[in-house]
Image (spheres, rainbow, N blue to C red):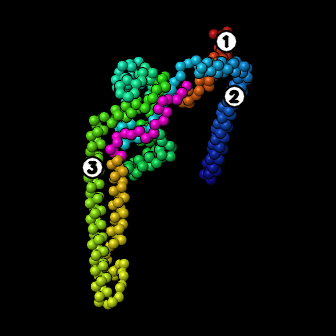
Amino acid sequence: MSKDLPQPQQSEEVDLGQLFKLIGNAFERFFKFIGNILNKLFLAFVWFVFFVKKHFIKLVIAGVIGVAIGFVLEKTGEPVYKSHVVVKQNYPNVGENLYNTLQYYNDLVRQNDTTTLSRVLGINKGYFKIDASSILGFEMESIITENQKIKNFDRYRKDLDSTLATTIQYKDYLKNEKDYNHQMQQITIWARDRSNLKGVFERIVEGVKENAYFKDERDKDTLELASEIKDLKEALTKSENLQETYKEILEKGVEQNTEKSGQVNLTFEGNSEKDKTREYDLFMNDIILRNKLVQKQREKADKEEIIEIISSKQDSGSIDNSKELLGLDLGLKKYYAILIMAFMFLGLLGLEFVRFLERFKDKI
């Protein structure tokens, strides 16, 4: 039996050697795989460079043609004018209502229903007269910085349960947060006619103000805030009267001490609870009440306006011949230059792919 004892140890040593060999082979195959990918990427890059070099003149000619087309369209095409205003929303759901309203107006523009568009906007009535057929579209976008978004996210998490707040990520918050919910919004109108669009903007805002739901919410909120303001004023008056009472008591106490001892002793705070006048506490309470009163008055002033125009620029419109490409606003020259170069590149790439497939024609 003693001769058989070393055999398990030798078997374990062999097994460990095989294990390390397998691990080494796995790493070797992994690094070869990564190397092959990098090699293919490098070869693709080299092929791309030589492909561009081969067709460089053609791509440059396509770019020049695009610039020429953009230049001609700028000089001969009908100009497009853009005008915008900034509005402030003082109630929830106002942004959604406004966004849906503008989408409805855009549908009317796409359908070329100028009669309905004129009627809902009140065009050709009152003091502003605009040809509804000249309006090309409406747009609304929020005015908010990334820093403000982070602050809103932090405020949103504080309103949630602590356990639930830890599960909410910033990217998830942005995904579910609607752009029209932000308080500051910019409304833009595009038109072919350089008319004064101020009346159209005012009519859009008035349409929101005339909404029955928002009018009811405004009446309820302003009534509640008026009641709170009244209560704060009454509390402030009582606090001031109480301070006057304490002042009279203090003055009488000083007079009595003077008559008895012939000396005046001023004590800001007595040695017992009975002697304390709490004047400082009343003074601080007055400051708190006044701050609350100012906040409520400001809140009431905001709530009295469902939505308001805070900035109006370019009422008569400014020329806007830009076009959007991959989320970027580009001038006509750049837009057509990039567009035609892209089509040329894809066309040449397609021809190159066909030539590559022709090599396997005889094998079919």
| Magenta segment | 302-321
Give me the C-alpha separation between circle 3 and circle 1: 80 Å
342 on left or right of 280:
right
Residue at x-position 43% and y-position 20%: 133
Local crowd size for mark 1, using a 10 Å CA cut-off: few (<14), some (14–19), many (≥20): few
Residue 168 vertical position relative to residue 133 in the rendered view, above or below:
below
Residue 178 vertical position relative to residue 360 in the rendered view, above or below:
below
Residue at x-position 62% and y-position 24%: 333
The residue beneath circle 2 is 45
* Residue 68 seen from this side: yes
Magenta residues: mostly which secondary structure?
strand
Give me the C-alpha separation between circle 2 and circle 3: 69 Å
N-terminal of the pair, mark 3 or mark 1, is 3
Q: Nearer the viewer, mark 1 or mark 2?
A: 2
Q: Secondary structure at mark 2?
A: helix
Q: Secondary structure at mark 3?
A: helix
The residue lying toward the viewer, choosing from 34 and 228, is 228
Residue at x-position 29% and y-position 58%: 232
Q: Nearer the viewer, mark 3 or mark 1?
A: 3
Residue type (three-letter) at the residue carrying disc 3: Glu
Residue type (three-letter) at the residue carrying disc 1: Glu
The residue beneath circle 1 is 358
Give me the C-alpha separation between circle 1 and circle 2: 23 Å
**Proximity of marks 1 and 2: CB atoms separated by less than 8 Å:** no
The residue lying toward the viewer, choosing from 66 and 263, is 263
Q: Quadrant of the C terminus?
A: top right
The residue beneath circle 3 is 224
The residue lying toward the viewer, choosing from 190 and 336, is 190
Residue type (three-letter) at the residue carrying disc 2: Phe
x then y, percent, for residue 130: 42, 24
83 on left or right of 338:
left
